[in-house]
Amino acid sequence: MVTWNNLDTLASFKELSEVERVNLVEAMSGENGADRVKNYSVPMAGGFSYNYAAKQVDDKVLAALVKLAEEAQLAEKFEALYNGEVINTGEKRLVLHHMTRGQLGDAVTADGVDKRSFYVEQQERIADFANKVHSGEITNAAGEKFTTVVQIGIGGSDLGPRAMYLALENWAKKNGKFKMEAKFISNVDPDDAAAVLNSTDVAHAIFVLVSKSGTTLETLTNESFVKDALKKAGLDPSKHMIAVTSETSPLAKSDDYLAAFFMDDYIGGRFSSTSAVGGAVLSLAFGPEVFAQFLEGAAAEDQLSANKDVLKNPEMLDALIGVYERNVLGYPATAVLPYSQALSRFPAHLQQLDMESNGKSVNRFGEPVDYPTGPVIFGEPGTNGQHSFYQLLHQGTDIVPLQFVGFKNSQIGTDVVIQDSTSQQKLCANVAAQIVAFACGKSDENRNKNFEGGRPSSIIIGEQVNPQSLGALLAHFENKIMFQGFLWNVNSFDQEGVQLGKVLAKRVLAHETDGALKVFSDLLNI
Ligand SMILES: O=P(O)(O)OC[C@H]1O[C@H](O)[C@H](O)[C@@H](O)[C@@H]1O
C-alpha cells in the first residue's frame, strides 16, 4: 500500500534541507570537476547517459535524496500506477500511457477490456491503414496516392506528435524511411489553417483530425475550415479525413471519416505521443516500423524508471534533483536546451508536459499545499538560445537550472570544416563550454564582466536523434514529471486550470459579457 503525503510532512525532506549546500564553483573546478563528470553519470536507454556533475549535489545531498525517494515511495507509486491504480484522483481515472509501449506490471482490465491488448490493437489497425496508404490500396477518389498528411489538433493532440515528427524528419529522409510529408494545423487563428492549406495539394492530402475529447473548439473549427477547403476544391471531405479520438467522444461514431483510431481516457493528451495520437501521423509519415522503434525506445526507458535503485534510475534522480532545486534552493524556473535542430519543438512539447502536469496549488486530495510546485519551463535549441536569452542565465539575478541535451552525431551527416572544426564539433564544443561557464564562472575586476558561476545544469548525452533515442528521451521527461508530481503530492494528470478561460471565451462569443470583459470585447471588435 502506498501513502500519499505532502512533501513538507516528510522527515527526509527536512533532513535534505539541512544538508550543507554544495559550492558548485569549487566542486566543478580542477581535478575535482573532472572526477565528477566521470562519476556523476547514469546510463539511459537509446544510447544516452544522464550526467549530473554540474548539478548542486554531492554524495551527502544524493544520500538525502535517496532517503526522500524511499520515504515518498516513488518506486512503489510508479508500480501502483502501471498496475492500474486510480492515480488521476481529480478525474477518477487510471494512468496508462506506459502501456502503449509495453507491459511493465500486471495486466490491467478496465471498461471490460485488457488495456494493453486494446492499445496494441489500435497500433495494428493504424499500421495496416498506413501500409495501405503507402502501397496505394487506399487512395483519393481519383485513385491517386496520398502524398501529404495534415494533422489537425491542439495541445497534447499537436505538440508531442509535431515535435516527434520534426525530430525524425531528416533522419527518415537520410535513411530511406520518409513516406509522406506531414504538416500541422493547431491554432484557431485563421492564418494558421489558411497558410497550411495554401501550401498543400489538398487533392493528395489525408487529414488526421485528433481530439481526445472530440469537443475542443479550436480543432472542430479547423476541421470545418479544412472541410470547406476540400469542398471548394470539388472533393469529398469524408474521403480525405481520418479521426483519432477516444471511443466515448462525439467523433467516434461519425461517418465523416475514412477511418477512426482510438485512445482512451486513461491517457492524458500530453502523454499521448506513444498512443494512436502520435501513431497515426508518425506511421503515415515514416512507416509503422519506425513508430514501433520509437515505442521500443520509450519502453526501454520506462524499464529503467522502474528501477528501485535511485542512482541507477535516471528519471527518479532527475526528478529528485529538480525538487531539491525548487523546494530547498528556491529556483523558480528550468530551461530545456537541446543542442540539436531536430529537437526544435521539443521544448514547446515539454512546456505543456511539465507545466500542465505540475502547475498545481492543491494536492491530490484538493487541499492547498504550502510549498512551490512545478517550475516555469522554457527553452530553445542551442546555439540559438545562446545568442538570445543566455545573458540572463549567466548574469541575471535569478538562478535558472538548465537541462542540456547533446548528441555526438548529426542526422543528415553533411558537414563542413571551417577553422579546423566541423559544425557538429562547434555545436558540441558550445554545450561543453556552457556547462563549465555556468558552473564555474569567471572573476573579473570589472563587475560588468564578472561571472559568479554556481549555476547548475545537467546534460543528457546521446549518439544521434533516431526513433529509439527519441522514444527514450520522451519517456525520460514524462517519467521525471510523474515522479515530481509524486513528490509534490499533486495530481499530475488533470488540467482544471485551462477551463476558466475557455468558459469566458464562449461568453464573449455569445455576447454575454459585462465589466472588463465587455470593454475588452469591444476593443477587439468581437
Ligand atoms: O485532444 P483534445 O481533447 O482536443 O484536447 C486538446 C488539449 O486541450 C485541452 O484544453 C487541454 O489543456 C490539453 O490537455 C489538451 O491536450
Image (cartoon, rainbow, N blue to C red):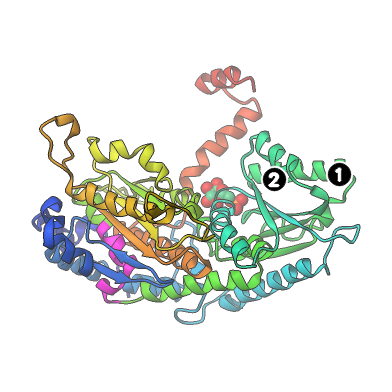
- Give the position of the C terminus as an image quadrant: top right
Q: Disc 1 and disc 2: Cα gap in Å?
A: 16 Å
Q: Which residues are magenta?
A: 308-321
- Residue 319 on the magenta span: yes
- The residue lying toward the viewer, choosing from 45 and 83, is 45
- The residue pinned by badge 1 equals 231
Q: Position of residue 385 (x, y in %)?
A: 39, 42
Looking at the rendered structure, the number of numbered marks drawn on it comes to: 2
Which disc number belongs to residue 220? 2
Q: Is residue 15 visible?
A: no
Q: Nearer the viewer, residue 300 or 275?
A: 300
Q: Which mark is residue 127?
A: none
Quadrant holding the N terminus: bottom left
**Mark 1 or 2, nearer chain start:** 2
Where residue 504 appears, as percent x and y from the top left, is 55, 33
Q: What amino acid type should be assigned to the residue bearing mark 1?
A: Lys
Judge from the rendering whether residue 285 lies leftward or rightward of residue 319; answer left or right.
right
Q: Is residue 400 left or right of residue 215?
A: left
What type is the residue that disc 2 sits on?
Leu
Q: Is residue 227 left or right of residue 291?
A: right
Residue drawn at point x = 64 percent, y = 25 percent: 511
Q: Residues within 10 Å of mark 2 (few under 14, many from 20)?
A: some
In depth, the one of 266 and 238 nearer the eye is: 238
* Left or right relative to 515: residue 60: left
Residue at 23% across, 47% down: 437
Looking at the rendered image, the disc whose residue lies closer to the viewer, 1 or 2, is: 1
Quarter residue 226 falls in: top right
